[in-house]
Amino acid sequence: MTMATPRPTPTLDDVALVIANYSRRLRTAEPWNAGAFIVVNAVIGFAWFCLLIVLLIAGGALSIILIGLPMLWATMRLWVKGARWERERLHRVFGIEILPPHRVTQASSWRGGIKARVTDLAVWRDLSYLLLLFPVGLLELSVVTLAAFLPVALILSPTYFWLGGIDIYGWNIESMLEALFASLIGVVLLPLALALFVGVARAHVEFARWMLGPSSGALQERVDVLTKSRAGVMEAMLGERRRIERDLHDGAQQRIVALAMDLGMAKEKLDSDPVVARQLVESAHDEAKRVLVELRELVRGIHPAVLTDRGLDAAISAVAGRSPVPVTVNVRLKERLPEPVEATAYFVVVEALANVAKHSRATRAKVTVTRHKDRLSVEVQDDGAGGANPILGTGLTGLGERLAALDGRLTVISPANGGTVVRADLPCGP
Amino acid sequence: MRAVIAEDSVLLREGIARLLTDAGMEVVARVGDGQALLTAIEQYRPDVSIVDVRMPPHFLDEGLRAAIEARRRVPGSRIVVLSQYVEERYATELIASGADGVGYLLKDRVADVNDFLAAVRQVAGGGTVLDSEVVAQLVARRRRGDRLESLTDREREVLALMAEGRSNAAIAERLFVSEGTVEKHVTSIFGKLGLPATEANHRRVLAVLTYLRE
């Protein structure tokens, strides 16, 4: 709190300062940016309104003869994209970040994908925003125009008076003094009008944030998804550890026991029965080599060294090389990806190729890895019997969980007698 | 024959040293990382070096890189690279430095003492030895839609054994057929793949590899 001081009589300097302040307030970019933003809102709103109404009516009408349905689907994708552009525009103009609230879909078929989209509230909020942008934008524009017009009219009132009597918003100006007074009020009101520009723009941002951003319901849903995928990953990790423990216990450990036993017996018989001792040593030697093979496979299953050293292409080529079904590998990546992404993509291929070998009766398979912007797509395709069910295949379920943890998704398309396509799609960083 | 061993696991290093010494070779240096390997090769000019792929400091593929570097610095260095896993990609990189006097084997192969010693001697003599697993990967990878498909299963087996650096006699013994039969297969393979038939063993490997790598 400041102490009250006796008000000094204004000097010329003070007046100059007030004028400088005043002109600075008029010259800041913010109100003009806000004004431009509001005008653009109305224009974009009008464009979206016309476009969407036409597309929706046409799509709705044509759905009787089915062409309308894909059209409506395309329209939906268009408005989701449009909402994304709006988020980007808000980011460019005001630097605010509105996180897209859409659900991360885990659908394993196109039908599931459509259902997930259509039932996602965020998609409909996107549409509402774009449609409301026109009336809301128009309203904002009117408010702002009126607000700008009033002080300008007041400031110019001496001119009108000069030209003849004038009436501003019901105020009939009858004398030059009155006109000058009105002009002064205009001068005072002008910065307030400009502040109103900013206020209206801010209000619009809040409106956009509310419509385009995650609602508390969406956030809750996201929390649920994350909780579930985290639990899934924990479960998958523990399952993996159990599997490794079991493999070591049933395999290598037992073999080493047998090997030690053979060697122990050979040691006993070295002098008394060299022939038997020799046989025992030979059997121990064979056992040791088998343990080595087993351990190598096990360790490779945990994490292949070549993936760390040389990346996805080399690692997938190696897996393909070991597959009993001939595999064509096509990895189109220019650079290395984050380790969790590489590992997940790799294990998708390993699991899918293992399924191809075990169940598909395929004669050939194809692995394709491509990157599109910030998403990596891994596809394993075979020409086998099809009919694979991701719900039955525990290996695939585990992969789905791993992918979910990275906000990726797994799609399995496997019609009976139509081959199988396993596709993983996951974000891979900027 | 003078050998250098580069292996960071002391247990395995001493084991291999004992194995080579027993076979009448002289182990002139035992080192534990890639840098030391380069120094040792430059200093001792050994007839052959046995090198582990994974070594300090990062335990990735330092041994492989050191081997390639050694062959650049001391041309004609003969090196057997041992690895816990064999991957076709590493084999290709190693062979790219020239295939004469190069070996790439699974570490497990040390257990079969005689085969291992034979491989070391072959590399020391300027030959090429690839692990059967690498060859299998190469053959499998190239199995789709190309001329390898015109080979019969038997011919493919023979090709794989050839790539491992085996002579016709060794292949015959392995497949329980006569040497004449193997020769017939070899001629047929060369014919189908359009490779010029040559005598020396490692040249055959080279030819096969060149073809497989395309």
Image: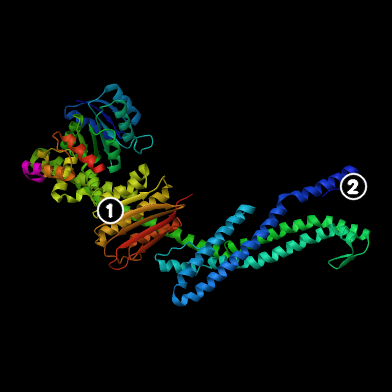
Residue at the image point whose x is 90% and y is 59% from the top: A162
Is B202 on the left-hand or right-hand side of A140? left
Residue at the image point whose x is 39% and y is 48% from the top: A333
Labels 2, 1: front one: 1
In this rendering, is residue A103 above or below B64? below
Does B204 lie within the magenta span? Answer: no
- Magenta: predominant secondary structure element? helix
Residue at the image point whose x is 92% and y is 60% from the top: A178
Element class at badge 2: loop
Answer with the quarter of the image where residue A405 lies: bottom left
Q: Is residue A332 visible?
A: yes
Element class at badge 1: strand
Are discs 2 and 1 located on one and the same chain?
Answer: yes
In this rendering, is residue A75 above or below A265? below
Q: Distance of mark 2 from mark 1, alpha carbons? A: 88 Å
Is B133 on the left-hand or right-hand side of A124? left
Q: Which residues are magenta?
A: B175-184
Is A241 on the left-hand or right-hand side of B197? right
Q: What residue did someone put label 1 on?
A: A327
Does B183 lie within the magenta span? Answer: yes
Q: What residue did someone put label 2 on?
A: A5
- Give the residue at the far top of this rendering: B43
The answer to which of B99 and A73 lies nearer the viewer is: A73
Number of marks present in the image shown: 2
Q: Residues within 10 Å of mark 2 (few under 14, many from 20)?
A: few
Q: Amino acid at mark 2?
A: Thr
Q: Position of residue A277 (x, y in %)?
A: 11, 41
Q: Position of residue A144 (x, y in %)?
A: 73, 61
The answer to which of A362 and A193 lies nearer the viewer is: A193
Q: Is residue A264 visible?
A: no
- Give the residue at the far bottom of this rendering: A64
Q: Amino acid at mark 1?
A: Val
